Image: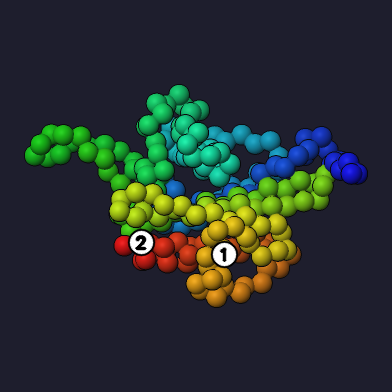
């Protein structure tokens, strides 16, 4: 078997590197798509306390790490149960005291009919390779459900999420070579809404 050679012209671009990431209804990133685009470069994520730095790091972690092994908000030294898929899905942002019982209760940006979408594109300039991965989350009986897909630039998405979509919704969209990985966010939102509506 012939060995593959990484032809990256710049050592700082070696390997698969994050090109773009988009989140929708993830933590306090609410109601619209929010993007970061490091374009494969080493990047510094800065901002005030509570601005969402760890939330974006946790989004990447969610896409890449098995869920049973994730410790959210690890960069801030948080306890293992401080943040969860559920809290990110609902958009938990504070605790407040109940007016009558004085018990602490969590406050959310979104109700139980919400959904979340995570999408990331990774590129390897040395291999001239490009892959995108995505996950969709929704609630069923107040428990998070998820599905996934992955695809290479210029191809149709694959994975259980899009197998479902093609089988039940006759999804036949063609993906162009340029920007194909990013046009999919609207489709993912449509799929998520379908799951929410049919989660009873």
Left or right of 98? Residue 161 is right
Rounded to the nearest whole Å, what is the CA distance between mark 1 and mark 2?
A: 18 Å
The answer, for residue 47, to whether it is visible in the render is no
Give SS at disc 2: loop
Residue corresponding to mark 1: 163
Query: Who is closer to the viewer here, 140 or 154?
Result: 140
Left or right: 184 as drawn, with respect to 79: right
Of 42 and 82, which appears nearest the observer? 82
* Relative to 178, 95 lies left or right: left
- The mark that comes first in sequence, 1 or 2, is 1
For disc 2, the marked residue is 199
Q: Residue 18: x and y, percent?
A: 66, 44
Q: Using the rendered image of the protein, determine whether residue 130 is visible from the camera's viewpoint.
A: yes
Q: Determine the image quadrant of residue 11.
A: top right
Residue at 13% of width from left, 34% of height from top? Answer: 102
Residue 111 vs 171, above or below: the answer is above
Residue 106: give x, y in percent of width and height: 26, 40
Q: At x 68% / y 62%, what residue is drawn?
A: 179
Give the residue displayed 37% in from the left and 32% down from the top. 82
Residue 146 left/right relative to 45: left
């Amino acid at each position: 078997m012939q060995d593959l050679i990484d032809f990256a012209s710049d050592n700082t671009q070696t390997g698969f590197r994050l090109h773009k990431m988009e989140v929708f209804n993830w933590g306090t990133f609410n109601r619209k798509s929010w993007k970061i685009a490091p374009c494969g470069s080493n990047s510094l994520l800065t901002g005030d306390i509570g601005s969402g730095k760890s939330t974006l790091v946790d989004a990447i972690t969610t896409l890449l790490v098995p869920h049973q092994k994730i410790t959210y908000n690890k960069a801030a030294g948080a306890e293992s149960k401080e943040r969860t898929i559920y809290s990110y899905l609902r958009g938990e942002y504070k605790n407040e005291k109940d007016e009558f019982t004085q018990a602490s209760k969590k406050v959310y940006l979104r109700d139980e009919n919400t959904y979340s979408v995570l999408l990331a594109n990774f590129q390897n300039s040395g291999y001239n390779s490009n892959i995108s991965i995505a996950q969709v989350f929704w609630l069923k009986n107040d428990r998070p459900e998820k599905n996934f897909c992955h695809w290479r630039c210029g191809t149709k998405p694959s994975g259980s999420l899009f197998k479902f979509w093609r089988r039940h919704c006759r999804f036949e969209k063609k993906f162009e070579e340029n920007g194909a990985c990013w046009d999919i966010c609207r489709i993912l939102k449509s799929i998520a809404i379908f799951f929410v509506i049919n989660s009873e």
